[in-house]
Amino acid sequence: MHLSGACAFVLAILIPAQNALAVPAYARQTGQACIACHVSFPELTPYGRNFKLSGYTIGVRQTIPLALMAQAGVVDVKNNKDDQGNPIVPKPKKIELSAASLFLAGKVNDNVGGFVQWTYSNLNVNNAGDTVGHSGIDNADIRAVGRIENDDKTDIKWLYGATLHNNPTAQDVWNSTPAFGFPFTGPPNGIGPNAATIIDGGLAQQVAGIGAYVFWNRTIYAELTGYRTADGAFSALRAGQDTHTPGGVARLKGTNPYWRLAYNREWGAQSLMFGTYGLIVDRYPDNTLPSTPTDRFTDVAVDAQYQYITDPHTLTAQATYIHEKQDYRASYPATLDGSPIGAGPTPDNFGDRIHTTKFKVSYYYEHRYGSTLAYFSTRGNNDAGLYAPGSVNGSINGSPNSAGYIVELSYSPIQYLRLLLQYTGYTKFNGTTTNYDGSGRNAKDNNTLFLNAWVAY
Amino acid sequence: MYKNRHVVFALFLQLGLTTMDFAAAPAAGDDAAEKLATQVCVSCHGPGGNSTSPTFPKLAAQQPAYVVAQIKAFRGKTRGEPEAHDYMLGMATLIDDTTAEALGRFFARQSPPKGIPGDARVIAQGKGVFEHGVPDRGVVACATCHGATAAGMGIFPRLAGQHSAYVIKQLRAIQSQLRESPVMHGIVKDLKPDEMTALATFLQSLD
């Protein structure tokens, strides 16, 4: 048993429940407790959304604007052996430090602020299949903002700003979009379904997004952002990524547009949002061959969020539906010709569609005890060229369909620590329920129990 | 009737010419306070201090001396209830005395919150306690200090239109002395839960 992980658990039991004041970077800047901005990190309250849209500038600039975060956990997969009897997820059933992050976060002045997160992953699996430590940049978001007050000077009528960030939807303030959507943490090296829309984590820490947004009367939010591959002057935004291996990071052509529109209402202890967002991406099939034609992915999504935040009860819910049109205008002809582009996709079809649905509802008591129930599903048309059979990660019927649920229980004895018990169950995996990979593996063999301690200071 | 009609006329002219209230010559800290109020306070306390969430009290039309006193209480940590601790302790350290006075003036000049109607019988009970107190348990009539219309006076806060849930929470915090308020503690220590609810419902219904 690793000592560091054991210490985290023992510490959690010994420290009595108390409301101390010393807190992570933004809390130090504002002097407020974590719950002022977060339902439970990272989910945001209305005030937290305002803080983020204000460019993280509320409060007093700190001399040392740093914060730390670390996670340790235990993973248990229902059936952790592939058809050869080899373990799939490394180091199961042992307490392991999974990640530690350093944040440089805070305001520069009343108009400029942001955060840059750098993460060391202890359980990174490299190309050789070994589990080694690896560090690199994580989410980053730097903003410049302005404000125009209303006529009687009682509120801000226009809150507007520009953002530079490195993950589509990391700049969003509602937790219904992918980057800061549920689940907020998961087993490192967990077994996940093959198919996902590109906006759902596919470009994280690989792109530089420059966008402009406006929040009118706390009611209408509108944003336009352009994403480019984070190279050249923006290389820092993907520092630590493997840009040399074919099939590694995504490489985009030119500037790729993203939009976001949201309707927001806040009344009593409740808040509600209905919105839409989307992205059109031209992607080189092989990131090491940037002179070939590109495939095009068009994502259009709708989302909604509801929060009821009082003392002692808090109830929150998020939902999103993402539709993706995959236009293999480069990869399909090349594959048909018998010479696929490098390590790029080898689709059977000129175009495919997939769509993802996610829904979660959480209840917290006294900001301390939490429970969450979530449902997820990805469906699409069959494409055996993309979803081929193969042990554990393949698909016997060429279908991208996966679905399941997540149940979570959490406990925060003090505001810097959250203990989490998470169970992910799959009702369908890579196309079907039984023998999905052609080697005898069932969807529920991938069910995973995850115990996690998350510390932030 | 007036001895010097010219002086009186000049005074009326000046009152007419000033566009805000007639103490409108900008005092020290007014700009900073307005900026703080519209950019920060509004997130929880609502536009002009008209909060919609009962976790955060309405500050609109609040007595300026009371606003200043509470900011100092947050700084001095004499308000120990959890929300004061979690939200306001740190916020108050951003506010110096000049800005606190200016914030008091800012909220004082906002339009009072609208009352929210409630159960007529409960309101009648609350009105009774507000206007007459509960003499056999030493509960002084609230109107004595908070004013006949609950608009407040000096350091005694406006209660009219306040969130009932917030009023109840503060009465409990004062009873348990989590919120240090010796005078109020003496008055409300024997107030019963149903009386608190009735009072709060009555106050929330006032304009």
Image (cartoon, rainbow, N blue to C red):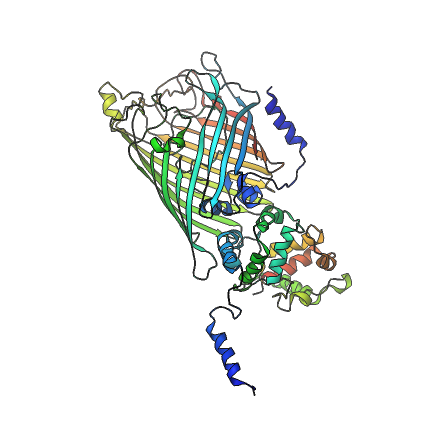
Judging depth in this view, the residue of B100 and A399 nearest the camera is B100
Give the residue at x 53% y 50%: A269
Image quarter in which the C terminus of chain B is found: bottom right
Q: Is residue B58 visible?
A: no
Q: Is residue A152 visible?
A: yes
Instruction: Residue B38: give x, y in percent of width and height.
Output: 49, 55
Residue furthest out toward the right:
B136
Instruction: Residue A177: give x, y in percent of width and height.
Output: 42, 38
In the displayed structure, B96 sits above or below A72; it is below
Judging depth in this view, the residue of B8 and A365 nearest the camera is B8
Give the residue at x 29% y 25%: A285
Image quarter in which the N terminus of chain B is found: bottom right
Give the residue at x 51% y 78%: B11
Give the residue at x 48% y 18%: A131
Instruction: Residue B98: give x, y in percent of width and height.
Output: 57, 58
Instruction: Residue A317: give x, y in percent of width and height.
Output: 49, 41
Residue furthest out toward the top:
A84
Number of on-image labels: 0
In the rendered structure, the answer to whether residue A302 lies left or right of residue A337 reads right
In the displayed structure, A149 sits above or below A320; it is below
In the rendered structure, the answer to whether residue B169 lies left or right of residue A379 reads right
In the displayed structure, B76 sits above or below A401; it is below
